[in-house]
Image (cartoon, rainbow, N blue to C red):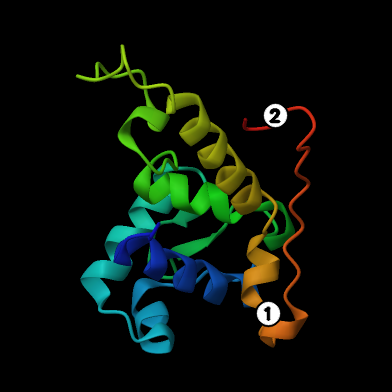
């Protein structure tokens, strides 16, 4: 099963916490206290997300991090890519690497299509969506999938 790594999972927890007060500057110690994620991990996540331009870093005694955009304008896809890179279910669906069986394998494009659908779904879920508590019955993933243009045969 497709599974994001723990660092990416923790990144969504950190970003969701920041989304509650998006204009506030939060320091790593405060984030650690509220998320219960250890401080070295929080610091690593903050640096990675700042490098990806999802967070703004403020130096100094009152320094810390804040969201670079409103939570409504940050997709979960951006967070995943900042930590893990592009989403792909198989190695061949993520890049054009040489594969030992590529001359006889005809499913590469199908895996690419499946990866694209997952990427699109993650793109359509915002940090604002993730930050608010929902009951499972309330969650609506707004995936705008156009099956007619990319049908898998």
Question: Residue 22 appears at what percent x and percent y?
Answer: 64, 68
Residue 116 sits above or below residue 76 on the image: above
Left or right relative to 12: residue 143:
right
Q: Earlier in the sequence, mark 1 or mark 2?
A: 1
**Mark 2 closeness class: few <14, some 14–19, many ≥20 residues within 10 Å:** few
Residue ID at (77%, 57%): 142
Q: Which residue is more in the foreground, 60 or 33?
A: 33
**Which is in the foreground here, disc 1 or disc 2?**
2
Residue 148 sits above or below residue 35 on the image: above
Left or right relative to 99: residue 132:
right
Residue ID at (78%, 37%): 146
Q: Which residue is mark 1?
A: 132
Q: Which residue is mark 2?
A: 150
SS at mark 1 in the image: loop
- In which quadrant of the rendered image does the N terminus lie? bottom left
**Mark 1 closeness class: few <14, some 14–19, many ≥20 residues within 10 Å:** few
Question: Residue 138 appears at what percent x and percent y?
Answer: 77, 81
Question: Residue 82 appears at what percent x and percent y?
Answer: 43, 46
Residue 21 visible to the viewer: no
Could you say which disc has been placed on residue 66 in the image? none
Q: Which residue is more in the foreground, 39 or 91?
A: 91
Q: CA distance from mark 1 to mark 2?
A: 33 Å
């Amino acid at each position: 099963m497709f599974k994001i790594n723990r660092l990416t999972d923790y990144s969504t927890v950190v970003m969701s916490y920041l989304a509650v007060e998006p204009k506030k500057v939060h320091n790593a110690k405060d984030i650690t206290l509220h998320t219960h994620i250890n401080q070295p991990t929080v610091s690593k996540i903050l640096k990675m997300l700042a490098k990806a331009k999802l967070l703004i870093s403020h130096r100094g005694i009152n320094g810390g991090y804040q969201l670079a955009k409103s939570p409504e304008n940050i997709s979960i896809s951006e967070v995943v890519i900042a930590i893990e890179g592009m989403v792909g279910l198989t190695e061949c669906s993520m890049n054009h690497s040489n594969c030992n069986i590529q001359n006889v394998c005809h499913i590469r494009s199908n895996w690419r299509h499946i990866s694209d659908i997952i990427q699109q779904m993650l793109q359509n879920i915002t940090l604002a969506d993730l930050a608010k508590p929902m009951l499972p019955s309330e969650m609506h993933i707004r995936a705008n999938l156009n099956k007619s243009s990319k049908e898998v045969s």
